[in-house]
Image (cartoon, rainbow, N blue to C red):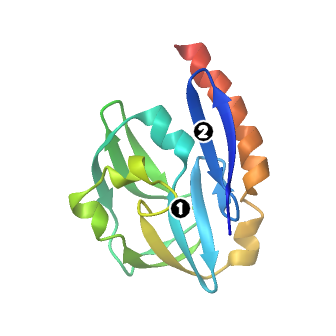
């Protein structure tokens, strides 16, 4: 069973799901055979605030690692969804249409955004971080965020 790595800063606990791969831009991919579920990290959802609106691309769209594949609007900001993998969108989470807050409530579970059929996983792996490596990067980002406040 996969668990979480955690770090605490001030009164906030930030979690990283083990067994997932992470883009440095705070998006994750959970590889399952020839496809991957894609979503946002706990750090991203906590630092950007409550999700109010989500705009996704259509199923069937071809996507490339590092490219924008939609937008998320929160009470604090609007930002791009960045694809951690290359392939074709095969499913969009239907639960998010009426419940975008799932991105905040369960970013590593019910709050997944896309399922993508993978077309170049081995090449994409070079641009992804393990959970432990992402945890270290996230700690640096947390310190930077807190300096801004």
| Near-viewer residue (22 or 78) | 22
Up the image or down, 126 lies above or below 13; here it is below
- The quarter of the displayed image where residue 51 is located: top left
Residue 33: give x, y in percent of width and height. Answer: 64, 86
Q: Residue furthest bottom?
A: 34
Compute the Cα span from label 2 to label 1.
22 Å
Element type at mark 2: strand
Say whether residue 27 is left or right of residue 81: right
Residue at the left extreme of this rendering: 98
Q: Position of residue 87 (x, y in %)?
A: 55, 77
Q: Quadrant of the N terminus?
A: bottom right
Q: Which residue is mark 1?
A: 83
Residue 76 on image: x %, y % = 35, 30
Does the residue at mark 2 contact the one at mark 1 (Cβ under 8 Å)?
no
Name the one closer to the observer, 68 or 76.
76
Q: What residue is disc 2 on? A: 14
Q: Image quadrant of residue 95?
A: bottom left
Residue drawn at x 74%, y 67% is 125
Residue 35 in sight: yes
Q: Secondary structure at mark 1?
A: loop
How many C-alpha atoms fall within 10 Å of the one at disc 2: few (<14), some, or many (≥20)? many
- Residue 85 visible in rendering: no
Q: Is residue 78 above or below residue 58?
A: above
Q: Is residue 18 above or below residue 116?
A: above
Residue ID at (64%, 25%)? 9
């Amino acid at each position: 069973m996969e668990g979480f790595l955690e770090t605490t800063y001030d009164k906030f606990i930030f979690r990283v799901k083990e067994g997932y791969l992470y883009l440095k831009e705070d998006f994750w991919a959970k590889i399952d055979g020839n496809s991957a579920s894609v979503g946002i990290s706990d750090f991203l959802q906590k630092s950007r605030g409550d999700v109010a609106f989500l705009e996704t691309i259509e199923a069937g769209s071809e996507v490339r690692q590092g490219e924008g594949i939609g937008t998320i609007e929160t009470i604090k900001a609007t930002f791009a969804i960045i694809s951690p993998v290359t392939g074709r969108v095969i499913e969009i989470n239907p639960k998010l249409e009426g419940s975008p807050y799932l991105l905040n409530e369960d970013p590593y579970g019910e709050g997944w955004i896309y399922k993508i059929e993978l077309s170049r996983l081995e090449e994409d792996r070079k641009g992804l971080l393990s959970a432990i490596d992402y945890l270290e990067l996230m700690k640096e980002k947390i310190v930077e965020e807190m300096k801004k406040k």
